[in-house]
Image (cartoon, helix red, strand yellow):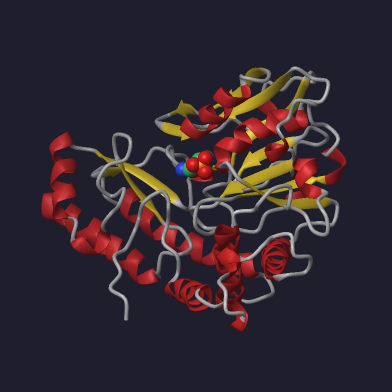
Amino acid sequence: ERSRCFNFSAGPAMLPDLVLDKIVGELGDYDGLGMSILEMGHRDAGGPVQEVLQEATDCVRHILGVPSNYAVIWQQGGAHGQFAAVPLNLLRDKTQADYVDTGVWSRRAMNEARKFCTVRVCAELREEGGRLEVPPVSEWNLSDESAYVHICGNDTISGVEFLEDLDLGDRLLVADFTSTLLSRPVNISRYAALYCSAGKNLGPAGVCLVVVRRDLLDFALPQTPMVLHWKAAAETSPIPSLANTPPVFSIFACGHVLKGLRRSFGDVGTLDNVKRRTQRRASAVYKIIDESNGFYINKVASAVRSQTTICFTFGRDATVQRQWTGSITDTVKPTDLEEAFGGIRICLYNGLPDEAVDEVLRLLRDFAVAES
Ligand code: PMP
């Protein structure tokens, strides 16, 4: 019996107890081979490391319903690596790209892209009648000269999420799904590429999942470093993602997270079931915020309210935030409940148990009553 505290931070996030048990259980001696998976070679064709890689990839394909004309690869360098990889792999003969600015992570992606091309901000978060909203696609200032359109699926810091998969027609839509993948089903075919750095729903940090349409694999600039080159990763033999030594532990652990999802949420409609839980948990938190008569404030319009990273401030004054911090008990540390970019943030990733959500709901209710 482990003594666990609840981690509401933006990541690295909690892993379910069962997943941790599986990882620990298999780690010392993998499959009775007298060695751990961490000590085995990745070049052994059909060997344990390739098996683990293949299994995790198959699980991603199954759970997300990835169509066969998309490659699934694992790269290092996290989402920041992909901030550079996206322009490098997609610019081809173009010199500019369109970016939607919904917060800090959108801008971080732009800052890397600016090293390789002209970045056009085609749309940004705006305040309308006291609500933060993302303009509809019909109002985006898109350019035919841009190689692709980049969005941040869930801007972890601003708490703004695209809750639906956008339809950009023939334009190449690229999305950073780092803090939202595996929280709902995704219509992959709407995207040219999407990426998700582990550390939140996917598993422990150290690897970044990339799903990319195969017909785009010839779009890379010639100077693209091999470790960020999607085609180089997609076409290694006998399976993808063996361009160099893969981060075996991360992929092994992500595989366990993915298998755990299938066990807990069913093999059919896994993400439909996850989505129901995600929505139930998020709406319970937003309900308290919205019904607090301005004690708690979240200005994000409901159409783009993050279902995973929920931010709020206190309506009254800054001293309330200090008292809030003091009211947090040891069971919920370490956590962004204490400070997050001028306010408080509650992150409800998949690994967080329901009892933790109950605990934070209680905290929100009790604190509002005590301070009112
Ligand atoms: N994008 C988003 C939306 C994120 O939430 C984060 C991590 N908080 C990142 C990118 C950065 O990921 P990494 O540290 O793996 O580069």
Q: Quadrant of residue 297?
A: top left
The total of numbered circles placed on residues is 0
Image position, residue 316 (x, y; %): 18, 37
Q: Is residue 317 visible?
A: no
Identify the residue at image location x=57%, y=41%.
77
Does residue 242 appear to the left or right of 119 in the view shown? right
Q: Is residue 120 visible?
A: yes
Q: Nearer the viewer, residue 316 or 81?
A: 81
Does residue 72 appear to the left or right of 208 in the view shown? right
Identify the residue at image location x=62%, y=77%.
266
Does residue 32 appear to the left or right of 54 in the view shown? left
Q: Is residue 149 above or below residue 274?
A: above
Q: Is residue 271 above or below residue 111?
A: below
Identify the residue at image location x=42%, y=73%.
17
Identify the residue at image location x=63%, y=26%.
99
Q: Is residue 158 above or below residue 65?
A: above
Image position, residue 223 (x, y; %): 75, 25
Image position, residue 172 (x, y; %): 77, 34
Farthest residue, direction bottom: 32
Image position, residue 25 (x, y; %): 49, 78
Q: Nearer the viewer, residue 273 or 242?
A: 242
Which quadrant is home to the N terminus? bottom left
Does residue 208 appear to the left or right of 174 in the view shown? left
Q: Quadrant of residue 109?
A: top right
